[in-house]
Image (tube, rainbow, N blue to C red):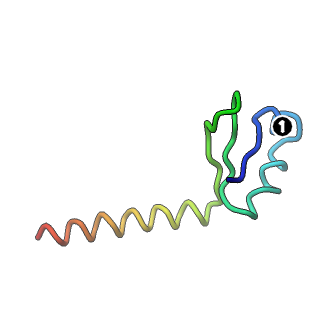
Amino acid sequence: MNTIASSEIKRRGIGAVDELLGNGPVHILRNNTPDYVVLTEESYKMIIDDLISARLDASDKDI
């Protein structure tokens, strides 16, 4: 899992996240607990497209 502490982002800026995004989604830790996930726009769109396809497939099965 690709992780970074929120304090590191505060110190270094969003560039710290950019460096890690090449290896996949970045989990942001607050108090050593994953609180947020940052992903590229492309990854986000793929997730949304997959979700829409799954919903359409489920709807087709109901017909």
Residue that appears at 73% across and 63% down: 23
Q: What number of labels is visible?
A: 1
Residue that appears at 64% across and 55% down: 39
Q: Quadrant of residue 7?
A: top right
Q: Quadrant of residue 57?
A: bottom left
- Label 1 amino acid? Glu
Q: Is residue 32 left or right of residue 41?
A: right
Q: Is residue 10 left or right of residue 21?
A: right
Residue that appears at 61% across and 66% down: 42
Relative to 4, residue 43 above or below: below
Decide: few, some or many residues near mark 1? Use Cα within 10 Å; few <14, some 14-19, many ≥20.
some
Relative to 13, residue 32 above or below: above
Which percent across, then down, holds residue 11?
Answer: 88, 35
Q: Which residue is mark 1?
A: 8
Q: Nearer the viewer, residue 23 or 10?
A: 23
Which percent across, then down, holds residue 30?
Answer: 69, 31
The furthest residue to the top: 31
Q: Nearer the viewer, residue 3 or 59?
A: 3
The furthest residue to the left: 63
Q: Is residue 60 left or right of residue 40?
A: left
Which percent across, then down, holds residue 47?
Answer: 49, 62
Circle 1: element type: helix
For the C terminus, the image quarter is bottom left
Relative to 4, residue 39 above or below: below
Q: Quadrant of residue 41?
A: bottom right
Which percent across, then down, holds residue 21?
Answer: 74, 58
Residue that appears at 81% across and 39% down: 9
